[in-house]
Image (tube, rainbow, N blue to C red):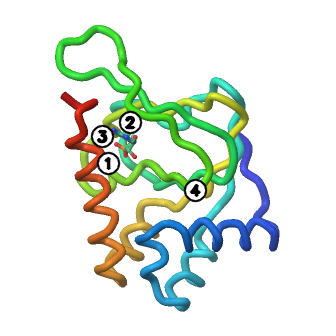
Amino acid sequence: MKKLPMTDADTVRFTGIAGRIKFFSSMSMALLEKILAWVTLCEYGKGERIRTQGDPGDAFYAIDSGRVSVKAKRGLLPFPRKLADLGPGDFFGEMALLSRQPRNATVTCEEPTRVFVLLADHFEAAAKENPRFAGEIRKLAEERGSGPERK
Ligand code: CMP
């Protein structure tokens, strides 16, 4: 993993992604500006794991470029099942932050991938300042958590 400096072009792309994500677009400009100051950009290589099932929830991720797979072991099954493929504009890592439980899946890069990272404290500050943000993201986490793949 390599931490990259946030350039003006990265900031513009993050704002674009944020605008397309329903819960970010519900934020005031003032809150979005605060978030921009908190966000960092990280680059991962193909095959690298961004997060592993069972890890503590320490950050939230929005994909800038690349592709990741989400896989998890459930119940007594001995091997992980693929739950989803995520790409630019998608996000992950919200479930452990909302539930305060360990990561429920492993996220692996299927190609070189860049992610915008928001640390847990900042994610919580954003959710506290904007209840609609908290509501939207909770709704999506619930949909992911109760999808057919989970059973
Ligand atoms: P978290 O549990 O923090 O870390 C693993 C992440 O994988 C999880 O948050 C979600 O963001 C993501 N995830 C888990 N299950 C699914 C799913 N069914 N579809 C898409 N993403 C998922």
Residue 89, numbered label: 4
Spatial CA distance of label 1 from label 2 is 9 Å
Q: Identify the mark nearer the N-term, 2 or 3.
A: 2
Lower sequence index among marks 1 and 3: 1
State the residue position of label 3.
Answer: 102
Q: Does the beta carbon of the residue at mark 2 sit less than 8 Å from ligand 1?
A: yes
Q: CA distance from mark 4 to mark 3?
A: 24 Å
Tell us which disc is closer to us: 2 or 4.
4
Q: At numbered mark 2, what does the secondary structure look like: helix, strand or loop?
A: loop
Disc 2 packing (10 Å; few <14; some 14–19; many ≥20): some
Pointers 2 and 3 in contact (CB under 8 A)?
A: yes
Residue 150 image offset from top left, x and y in percent: 24, 32
SS of the residue at dot 1? Answer: helix
Estimate the spatial distance between the alpha carbons at disc 1 and disc 4, rounded to whole Å: 20 Å
Amino acid at pointer 4: Gly
Residue at disc 1, CB closer than 8 Å to ligand 1: yes
What is the C-alpha distance between the residues marked 2 and 3? 5 Å
Under circle 3, the secondary element is loop
Residue assigned mark 2 = 55
Give the residue at x 24% y 23%. Answer: 74
**What residue type is disc 3 on?**
Pro
Ligand 1 contact, mark 3 (Cβ < 8 Å): yes
Q: Amino acid at mark 2?
A: Asp
Discs 4, 3 touching: Cβ within 8 Å: no
* Mark 1 lies on residue: 96
Image quarter in which the C terminus is found: top left
| Mark 4 or mark 3, earlier in chain | 4
